[in-house]
Image (spheres, rainbow, N blue to C red):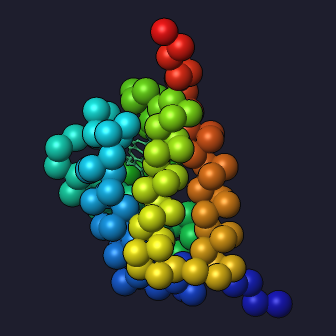
Amino acid sequence: GKRIVPYEVIGEKALHNLVDAFYSKVAKHPDLIPIFPDDLSEVAQKQKMFLTEYLGGPKLYTEVHGHPMMRARHLPHEITPTRARAWLSCMSEAMDEIKLDGTIRDEFFSRLVLTARHMVNTPDTVI
Ligand code: HEM
């Protein structure tokens, strides 16, 4: 049978709106500000291409930047459990803002939870 492609259900415009809403929240989140550049336009552009591919759409990220290997690309940045939670809360709020809901949202978000956990490369400091 025909497989559902989440990218086709969500659509390019909504995905781009989601990424823009997401990075405007990242820019204001105290746990995330220290590790992101001041200008988020380049990472937003990369994220639009990456999520297109992640959701089953055209392989835009791979075409331009090569194999995603996202965990390796995050190793230069201290991704703590606290930062993973902050990232996911920005994404959840961005999904609220663009009114992405239903099964498509739940399945997309559940996958992002797993991917975010996989990016964690640094423990939270205790002292
Ligand atoms: C890049 C943080 C999770 C996708 C980055 C950068 C940071 C970052 C600091 C580099 C920004 C720059 O200097 O250009 C985080 C944190 C996460 C997280 C704190 C929490 C777990 C994720 C997840 C995804 C993702 C779950 C995908 C589903 C990307 C992409 C880039 C990126 C596509 C651009 C990579 C490139 O340079 O080509 N992230 N990230 N990140 N992140 Fe994340």
Please state if 105 lies on the left or on the right of 67 as rendered.
right
Q: In this view, does 59 lie to the left or right of 44?
A: right
Q: Which of 73 and 10 is in front in this view?
A: 10
Whether residue 61 can be seen here: no
Q: Position of residue 47 (x, y in %)?
A: 39, 59
Residue 31 screen position, x and y as percent: 37, 37
Q: Residue at x 53, y 22 (%)?
A: 124
Residue 23 horizontal/vertical position (percent):
31, 58
18 relative position to 59: left or right: left
Extreme top residue here?
127
Where on the picture, by quarter, is residue 49? Answer: bottom left
Ligand 1: image quarter:
top left
91 up-or-down from 125: above or below: below
Residue at 63 percent across and 52 percent down: it is 113
The x and y percentages for residue 29 are: 33, 46
Q: Nearer the viewer, residue 3 or 38?
A: 38
Say if 88 sits above or below 124 in the image: below
In the rendered view of the protein, which quadrant contains the N terminus? bottom right
Q: Is residue 41 left or right of residue 99?
A: left
In the picture as drawn, the residue positioned furthest to the bottom comes out as 1
Q: Which of 43 and 85 is in front in this view?
A: 85
**Which residue does the image show at 38% across and 51% down from the upper left?**
65
Which residue is farthest front? 127
Could you tell me if residue 68 is visible in this image?
A: yes
